[in-house]
Image: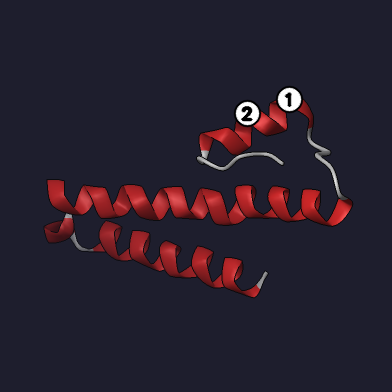
Amino acid sequence: MFSGIISIFSNLIVLGIFIKYKELRTPTNAIIINLAVTDIGVSSIGYPMSAASDLYGSWKFGYAGCQVLDIFGMKAK
């Protein structure tokens, strides 16, 4: 849980810096922003769903939850 919170906040800082400084808005840096946004999604949605399922012992989020997890490139167990 601690590493997920650190990941979310550090990626929010990256996004904030990107928004504040216009000279950083280059096509190459767009890849970094894409990675930061994706990592925020994985840290805030993907990992908690996966951890909850691991603790429960089976998948509790149904078909829609499985599709959400698949968007982040993770596999439901």
Of helix, strand and loop, which one carries label 1? helix
Which of the image's four quarters has the N terminus? bottom right
Indicate whether 20 appears above or below 46. Answer: below
Any mark on residue 63, and which?
Answer: 1
The percent coordinates of residue 28 (x first, y second) are: 14, 51
- Number of numbered discs: 2
The percent coordinates of residue 57 (x first, y second) are: 86, 49
Q: CA distance from mark 2 to mark 1?
A: 6 Å
On the rendered structure, is 24 left or right of 43? left
Q: Quadrant of residue 23?
A: bottom left
Q: How is the image coloured?
A: secondary structure
Q: Which residue is mark 2?
A: 67
The percent coordinates of residue 27 (x first, y second) are: 14, 46
Residue neighbourhood size for the residue with mark 1, other residues' Cα within 10 Å, grouped as few (<14), some (14–19), many (≥20)? few
On the rendered structure, is 50 left or right of 10? right
The amino acid sitting under disc 1 is Tyr
On the rendered structure, is 57 left or right of 6? right
The amino acid sitting under disc 2 is Gln
Residue name at image x 31 percent, y 52 percent: 33
Name the residue nearer the viewer: 39 or 74.
74
Residue neighbourhood size for the residue with mark 2, other residues' Cα within 10 Å, grouped as few (<14), some (14–19), many (≥20)? some
Residue name at image x 70 percent, y 54 percent: 48
